[in-house]
Amino acid sequence: QVQLVEFGGGLVQAGGSLRLSCEASGRTFDTYAMGWFRQAPGKEREFAAAISGNGLNTAYANSVKDRFTISRDNAKNTVNLQMNSLKPEDTAVYYCAADRRAGVYATRSRAYEYDYWGQGTQVTVSS
């Protein structure tokens, strides 16, 4: 069982930045594909960004590409999401997720492919 805990959400003005972090338990973190998803009120959960186990491959939703950067530190069992140029439409609860079956090279963009989820952290962007 893997436990994921997100940190770093909060309130920021449009155009500002936030950095989310997710800490994972477990001894095989570097074999997990990791992802960030988000869910706005009244909307379905959507993919934001993903990173492979070895950290060499990343994927982004078009809505966040060139503004968000996903990274990981396998020595610390953490994955981060640097969010720049934030917009009010980025307001959502952000969830960290882990896929233990992806292998070290793959990224995953579909929620059903992930095995473990964090509790979420609120990001609010004011206009």
Image: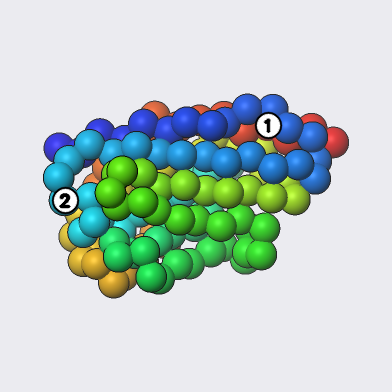
Q: Is residue 32 visible?
A: yes
Q: Is residue 113 visible?
A: no
Considering the numbered disc 2 on the image, is that residue within a helix, a strand or a loop? loop
Residue furthest out toward the right: 127
**For the point 45% across and 67% down, which residue is it?**
58
Relative depth, front residue between 71 and 50: 71
Q: Is residue 104 left or right of residue 84?
A: left
Q: Position of residue 34 (x, y in %)?
A: 35, 54
**Amino acid at the residue labelled 1:** Thr
Distance of label 2 from label 1 (alpha carbons) = 33 Å
Considering the numbered disc 1 on the image, is that residue within a helix, a strand or a loop? strand
**For the point 36% across and 51% down, which residue is it?**
73
Q: Is residue 70 left or right of residue 53?
A: right
Where residue 43 sits, quadrant-wise, is top right
The quadrant in which the C terminus is found is: top right
Q: Position of residue 86 (x, y in %)?
A: 73, 46
Relative depth, front residue between 29 and 34: 29
**For the point 56% across and 57% down, which residue is it?**
69
Q: Is residue 89 left or right of residue 28?
A: right
Residue beneath disc 1? 124
Residue beneath disc 2? 28
Classed neighbour count for the residue bearing mark 1: other residues with Cα under 10 Å, few (<14), some (14–19), many (≥20): many
45 relative to 93, above or below: below
**For the point 24% across and 56% down, which residue is it?**
30
